[in-house]
Amino acid sequence: MSEKATAKPGTGREAGTENAVSLDEVAVRFRTRKRDVTALREVSLDVPMGEFVAIVGPSGCGKSTMLKLVAGLLKPSTGNVRLRGDKVDGPRPDIGYVFQRAALLEWRSARKNILLQAEMRKMPAELARRRTAELIEMTGLKGFEDALPHELSGGMQQRVALCRALLHEPRVLLMDEPFGALDALTREQLNIEMNRIWRETGTTVLLVTHSIAEAAYLANRVVVMTDRPGSIAEIIDVDLPAERDYAATMARPEFARVTNRIRGLLGAGAAAD
């Protein structure tokens, strides 16, 4: 049985007021044609509003499964998932989701790909247009509003996907390896942008990543998972300022402490991700 873990309140505008996400003794089991599989085993976690939490662990340990539970796309076999105190029993309209691939519609411009969210949610047109313009400015897409996806770099495509996920001002933003397919320099730049966007919006974020450095740079706390059946091995505080200069953060002793602890728990080598 895993010990209930509460993430330390961050510095977002709603931080510390209440839990945005709560998982209480959650387990996920399913049956394949050959055997029963336990994907998650008795996972408990509280994430306060405004917190940025990264989830790392071996492949197949249930990291993405946790995000699907929070989004209401998957029901737990046992236990409960709550969003701001309300039990999650189906897809939630107050969730934003960013996947590893941007999944943009090739025939729609960047602006119209963002506005797809508004169309699906029937947002008031003027509100959607104003919010889209704000997000385009915030994410550095100004001047590329009318570009088609094939005219955008991979990093810009992910910025569009992020804008689309944030358009309706979700209570919780779920990010499943959103920068994993990008080159190192683009990934670094988007990490810097993501830290800034989180600070400006105060949105609660749950990020799944295989990058130890990315987790330590972005998060207030890092949830380290065990191998399948996945459970929480440890939750590590990241005692760094909310605003993080990339190079300076990497050089701080606290950053090294966090990344080394994660590597030790995962049995990873000494080289940085």
Image: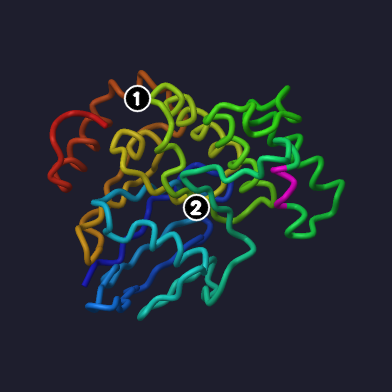
Residue 35 x, y percent position in the rendering? 22, 78
For mark 1, does the 10 Å Cα neighbourhood hold few (<14), some (14 to 19), or many (20 or more) residues? some
Tell me which label, 1 or 2, sits earlier in the chain. Answer: 2
User: Would you say the residues marked 1 and 2 are in contact, meaning their CB atoms lie under 8 Å apart?
Assistant: no
Viewer-proximal residue among 249 and 175: 175
Query: Within the magenta stretch, is there residue 197?
Result: no
The image quadrant that residue 256 belongs to is top left
Viewer-proximal residue among 174 and 181: 181
Q: Which residues are magenta?
A: 113-117
Q: CA distance from mark 1 to mark 2?
A: 24 Å
Q: Quadrant of the N terminus?
A: bottom left
In this picture, residue 272 sits left or right of residue 114: left
Kind of residue indicated by mark 1: Thr
In this picture, residue 129 sits left or right of residue 141: right
- What residue did someone put label 1 on? 249
Query: Within the magenta stretch, is there residue 114?
Result: yes
Q: Secondary structure at mark 2?
A: strand
Q: Which residue is depicted at the point 73% across and 40% down? A: 108
- Most frequent secondary structure within the magenta stretch: helix
Which dot, 1 or 2, sits closer to the camera? 2
Q: Is residue 200 above or below residue 87?
A: above
Residue 128's label in the rendered image is none
Residue 260 x, y percent position in the rendering? 18, 36
The image quadrant that residue 113 belongs to is top right
- What residue did someone put label 2 on? 174
